[in-house]
Image (cartoon, rainbow, N blue to C red):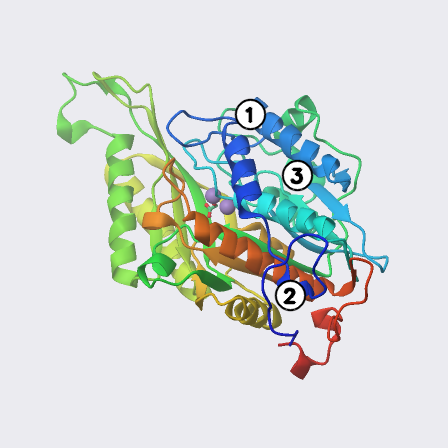
Amino acid sequence: MNPPITDPAAPGTATDPRSLRVDGSRLAQRLEVLGEVGSTGDGGCCRLALTAADQAGRDLVVGWMRELGLAVVVDEVGNVVATRPGRRPGPPVMTGSHIDTVRTGGRYDGNLGVLAGLEVLETLTDHEVETEHPMAVAFFTDEEGSRFAPDMLGSLTYVGGLPVDEARAVVGIDGAVLGDELDAIGYAGPARCPGPPPVAFVELHIEQGPVLESEHVTIGAVTEVQGIAWYEITITGQSNHAGTTPIGLRHDPMLAAARITVFVRELCQRLGSQQVGTVGQVELHPNLVNVVPARATLTVDLRNTDAGALRLAEVELWRFCDKVGWEEGVQVAVRDLARFDPVAFDARIIEWVEATARDLGHSVRRLPSGAGHDAQMLARVCPSGMVFVPSVGGVSHHPAEHPDPADLTAGADTLLQTLLGLAGVASMGGRAPDVGWEPALDRPREAQT
Ligand code: GLV
Ligand code: MN
Ligand code: MN
């Protein structure tokens, strides 16, 4: 364990790295400025991946990275990694998240993790901290997957889970091709994927759910991310006149879509509270008041922390699609958009986050993540974990999403100290730090927490 935490220090005065704190108002200010890019005018943000708004957000954040003197690298799918050197050469301890949003997103999902990472690096520079390992902050392309499925596409490609040519060929909900959009906004960079594995990866994120707030807990040490399966279901029926076609003779794709939607809710109720399911997108053709539709397309998002239960839910959905197709006399085609098994985070990182938050005087609990995150992809190549802060009202993917300002700072401080422990401290203000500042994962297992 590192030495106990002392009082916060002013720049240039500290000798104990545990006294370092972020500048919460500087972080909040940057979140404000980034939130104005793609602002929806109601407190929210629309920066769907690889749109002009995403480009403007990227340019802003890359500008901040360069102002801090970080070495900025852009890879083939537009992931951006900004590195601050350490005493040792080699891979960095990395943090980061994403800055793309859903169409009706808030200002914190993803953005907090990226800008808190930047704030951590700026704090280290302010206090002349030289870390042992380099430290890096990244933002990954298309985490949301709202425009281009699957979600976490950039980090998946970074870790070698998706070949670059397949990523570039993905067609979005608007018919755009990912590679073309990447070229158009100037973010198809020269660095190759898969990228170099970091020493460790820790992501700060808002919880996006109600658990921490309802239990009055400030910090979540995230244990795992639940499994996810996304499907696009296209139902083709017989389009006809709404007034003249007897009900018994219809082959109505909208009715089949409605039955599938109800089935998803009933399936979740039957499988228990761990199973969630959402029909989030429905499109009809020709979508007119007096025409029985020709085609309905809907998406289904199924998630569960239990891999077996998730698979069972998927099989039940496929079987119901067959049944409804037969009963309604429509064709039902089911296409995979995304599928990821549940991911458990590294036990050492979970313990490290928990101990760090406690040392900082914050209440902390372990919890799983209901949302997908870039950290779950990085977990394939390095010890990874996450820090959560409460979402007010448990609201997310909504313009009203926000954390309490004090929690935001608490989360960023926890991120700072967690990363510092993982990176190790070589010197501070030109002086050697107190004993015990070897990078945490280099220490014998019993001394790591
Ligand atoms: C990403 O935000 C997801 O979990 O849908
Ligand atoms: Mn996110
Ligand atoms: Mn999101």
Quadrant of image for the C terminus: bottom right
User: Does 435 appear above or below 313?
Assistant: below
Q: Position of residue 374 (x, y in %)?
A: 58, 50
Residue at left 81%, top 63%?
431
Residue at left 22%, top 17%?
289
Residue at left 50%, top 26%?
38
Q: Secondary structure at mark 3?
A: helix
Q: Position of residue 350 (x, y in %)?
A: 56, 68
**Badge 2: how crowded within 10 Å, few (<14), some, or many (20+)?**
many
Q: Secondary structure at mark 2?
A: helix
Foreground residue, 56 or 147? 56
Circle nearer the viewer, 3 or 1: 1
Q: Can the viewer see residue 162 in this picture? A: no
**Badge 1: how crowded within 10 Å, few (<14), some, or many (20+)?**
some
**Tag 1 and tag 2, C-beta contact below 8 Å:** no
Q: Position of residue 124 (x, y in %)?
A: 71, 53
The amino acid type, in three-letter code, at marker 1 is: Ala
In the shown orientation, is residue 192 left or right of residue 209? right
Residue tagged 2: 18
Residue tagged 3: 166
Q: Quadrant of residue 44?
A: top left
Residue tagged 1: 53
Q: Position of residue 179 (x, y in %)?
A: 66, 29
In the shown orientation, is residue 305 left or right of residue 382? left
